[in-house]
Amino acid sequence: MPEAMLPPETILGAWVAAGLTLFIYSFLYKDNPLFKLSEHLYVGISVGYSVVLAWHTVFLRLLWEPLKKSIGEAPASPDSYVLLIPAALGLFMLTRFIPQVSWLSRIAFAFVVGFGSGVAIPRTISSYILKQIEDTVNPLVPAAGGGFSAFMDFALPQSGVNTVILLIGVVSVLFYFFFSVEHTGAGMVTARTGIYFLMIAFGAAFGYTVMSRISLLIGRFRDLITFSGAAYSYATLVLLAVTVLSLVGWEVVVRRQNGERTRE
Amino acid sequence: MIFLKRQLPLAITFVMGVGFILQYYIPHPVSEDAITTVSKWMQIISGFALFLGLASLFHVHAVKIKRQVPGWGYSLALYVGMVGTMVAGFWNHGETMADGGQTAFGWLYDYTMVPLQGTMFSILAFFIASAAYRAFRARSREASVLLVSAVVVMMGRVPLGQFLVPWTWDVTQWLLNVLNSAVRRAILIGVSMGAVALSLKIILGIERSYLGGGKDQ
Amino acid sequence: MIFAPLVFALLFIGGPAFAGPPTPPEGFRALDTPNDAGKSLSLVWKASPSDTKERSIQVWAAASPQAAFKKVAEFPSNTRYVKPGDFPWWAQPAARGDHYLKLPSSQAFPIADGTPYAVKLLVREGDQEAWSDVVQATAAPNYFNWAQVNNLVFVLAFTGVLLGSIAAARRNPHIRLRRIAGLDAVEEAIGRSTEMGRPILYLTGSGGMDEVSTIAATVILGEVAKKVARYDTTLKVPHRDPIVMAVCQEIVKESYIEAGRPDAFKEDSNFFITGDQFSYTAAVDGIMLREKPAANFFMGSYFAESLLLTETGASTGAIQIAGTDSDHQLPFFVTTCDYTLIGEELYAASAYLSREPVLVGTLRGQDFGKAFIMGVLVLGTALATVGAIADTEVVSYVLDLFKDFK
Amino acid sequence: MKAFARRMVGIDRRVIFLLIAAAILLPMLKPFGLPIKVSPEVKAVYDYIEALPERSVFLLSFDFDPSSKPELEPQAVALLRHAFRKNLRVIGMTHWLTGTGLADGVFSQVAAETGRERGKDYVFLGWSPGGSALIISMGQDLYQAFPSDYTKTPTRGMPVLEGVRNLRDVNYMVSLAAGGAGIEMWYVFGKDKYRFEMAGGSTGVIAPGLYPFLRSGQINGLIGGLQGAAEYETLIKRKGTATAGMDAQSAAHFVIIVLVILCNVFYFILRGEKGSPR
């Protein structure tokens, strides 16, 4: 072998990763125990991971250490204990599961949701409404001049013709989401235009999403190909055989059981 | 008691909501300090909230194992994964790397969590293909428009498409920059207005379902 | 403000003809930066026809007129103009076309609130230079950002419209709302399930009770449950969020009581699976394959799981009705479901079906808002075009109202 | 003819799954290397970083987790290579708890390959909860929001953070986002108030939804999906995993396009028939 030997934990890792990947892909054949096993493992591991990191980041770094420090420096000052307020609210949140005191959790929810709503309102208006209006309202004649050919430049997002199309699009789609008037007459034309705009955008999003999902598959396949090499003692190939054989075995057992049941 | 259970939460929501709407318009350092402090508190509270979801998961699977309902073995696997990761994590003090080498916690992350999560999402690639085959039909004029636009973008966003049908690249750029932007913007404005309306209703106590159901509400 | 165009005109008439020796800048003054948190000063001076790239301006500052001055900034004299869009007309520290420089506190020159500082400018070209007078100003934090007052007006106006339309809807909840295509299918789907003797599956999405889409989904669930109770079909609602589940349990129970079938209500029609995205999806897919529901409802907000759910549902031959404001998943619902409520149609559907005054009123309020914005977009574009053709700044008195200033 | 079409419409979807797997696997084993065209929105990000002076502060937020690794990791690697080559000071962080280990790995790997030092040339702050609240907190005081970095080293006094008090001192920021907590949040709660220039890198799923922000200048550039990463790799003239994946991407897209066309052919053949598939 030309390359240096890989450390044993890397090889073991490759076997585990390749195995779990193939087990999950077995879902494409049908729902089966291998898939269920790896899926439950996945949930367990991700939960465990979150717990560990949350503990270290929230409790130690944001709560425990600053509290210890401030109380150590100024034990008499009430300011040193201010972090106990969010800690208490956090604990209130957890009372959700204790019916006798679950009302305490409402206080915590009220605090969080109240803050969230208050903070969101002016910022939503600024970024999602005013800023969007600002960029849609543009003079139809290009500021730099250039005449009709500049106006008709489709490639330039800010050109006159694109400003007009953008305006028609925004207004017609907004009109489609207008519920106080029935879509008849001129309203129908506008609403239909809105639907066409919507469908084109959905199509574009679909195409873009296809790209995204395929990329993920490429990423997984790349790992599987790497792990099928000699350096990893052909992990992918061996495990592929194991997975297929297990699925066949499982099929046989299930069919036999079903057969017995029908005979009974 | 009724006050504590019913009015107090609504009062807190109102005070917090109105206070932090006004905060936005006040550049004074006092207002800046207020948002700094409370944002930090929110960081801590949202850390606790994480445990809310975990607790229910814990409960659901504990019940399954205790009653030995069919498939309880999978719940056991879930527990093994969770406890194993937690033991490794606390043992390594939450570090994935130590002394230039990988810790057991880091190993678990790299070789179980990363492939499992990635694989789960990549299954969608297969489903998207079968959905395209089964559902992408020119049933109506709207459906045809959707279909054509999807195909053009699929072509325009990859080198092979740009190579075979060069105009798809420009058309894709235009679709995304102009038509798509227009639609997204309209949806954004509409949905934002919905979100602002909901936030206002929450602050004013008109909408209170976020507090959860229950008889004492 | 009115002479802003005049300054521009002067600029154009002037040109390089004026290039004499440097003169002190006209109208130089210092002031506390308006609408900020303090610790910063603003400098303003008039534009001059002799501003060029070669002529530079230096800013010198000191703690008092007697103290030693320190150079804090240098730039060409034809930069730092107040440009349209920098400030709204109702909160301009300087006229458009004037020079404006914000001098924040820095390590080189710290500025404290409450103490006066002295500032002067040096105009320089080649080895020739001219000093301005020394001006003084005191930095202070402000209590209100006037540049954002339009934002606040919108918040207040929208609150008023919202409360007004809710009050109107309380008096008359049967305000006309336009027909929504997917809704007729709800009845059809429930009817079909009854005929086939198969259950109905209803999902409320991935969001918590603080999302509009989830609230709409629970309201629609209430209406679906009423019909289900009347037809005597089975309803299954798997959940991802314990709070949403608690709310839905109440809602379904009330619907059964309202439909006069409290006996038919089953506590376990709402059940919790897990908060995890893919475990939940796999479990729901399992339910679809095993129990073959005749109708699947997907309401609320969704992420990548949408296609896994609807593709499996389509393969069992169920009627599928979706409604979501998650725009990134809409393409998949539109292609794989029989009917899809797009974006706000979901909110509208909940109001339409329930005729709940708060929901109907909110919908009306949002419609007013949208009508207003549509008007602003069309008239604004017209005004901006007129402004560009006539080369006038007057239109900005209107357009600035709908801009986002910081 | 109709019988054939009917059979094809009802074909087992596992056949389609196999086709897709083959379309991806074959070009990966035997790539054909088509040239990659660069879009203006990706070029904008590159140009901005290119124009930054040395030792400027560049904040890179990893707002994704392993589920989007194949799309966003190549973007992160390309951006970091560029930033380190330009000798920028890089601050890394993440809003996604489960993406923490991944982000740290990317930093260590690219830093090792370019010889940059932790604490001096870059810092990885790790994860902290709060989302928008965290951004506000960072905008006020970075050291309050992150008292220590991912390796538990105190952030105050780190050479890489010299002169950095809060988000106002950041020269450029890029959020690599896979969803909710990402680009929009950074804009609304961060850039909007603390005035730094920012761009976004995103998965293909959310990219179309970000175009309105690109148009209005709320973000100055956008790197979309694997194609975007490949474009960036082309710009920094260093081919990586994204460029390598584009052939497989092309092939898979074409299989899907052919499937869509076939589906419509069969649909039209069967259309007149009674009880045709919905």
Image (cartoon, coloured by chain):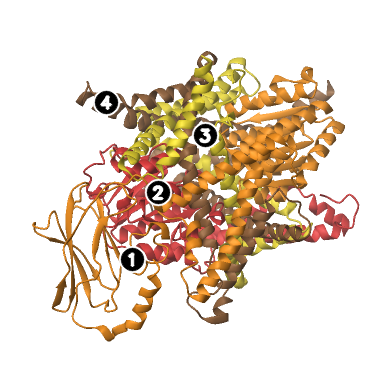
Which of B27/B74 is in front?
Answer: B27
Pinpoint residue A65: horizontal percent, then vertical percent. Answer: 28, 28
What residue is pinned by disc 1? D51
**Residue beneath the point at 28% across and 40% down:** D143
Q: Residue at the spot x=51%, y=27% of the render?
A: B10
Chain in brown on the image = A
Which three-letter amino acid code belongs to the residue tagged 3?
Ile
At label 4, the amino acid type is: Ser
Query: Chain C drawn in what color?
Result: orange
Residue D44 point in image, percent of width and height: 43, 65
Q: Which residue is mark 3?
A: B203
Q: Which disc number belongs to residue D244?
A: none
Which chain is indicated by disc 2?
D
**Colour in which the image shows chain D:** red
Residue sitting nearer the eye, D225 or A82: A82
Could you tell me if residue C267 is visible in this image? yes
Crowdedness of circle 2 by 10 Å Cα count: few (<14), some, many (20+)?
Answer: many
Looking at the picture, how far across and down is residue C375, in whole percent? 61, 58
The residue singled out by tag 2 in the image is D190
Q: Residue C185 placed where, x, y %? A: 80, 42
Q: Is residue A255 left or right of residue C377?
A: right
Chain containing mark 4: A
Q: CA distance from mark 3 to mark 2?
A: 24 Å
Q: Chain of mark 3?
A: B
How far is disc 3 from disc 1 in space, using C-alphas? Answer: 46 Å
Which badge, 1 or 2, is on the more N-terminal residue? Answer: 1
Q: Look at mark 4 in the image and give the residue it sits on.
A: A80
User: Which color is chain B depicted in?
Assistant: yellow
* Real-space Cα separation, disc 4 to disc 2, in angstroms: 29 Å
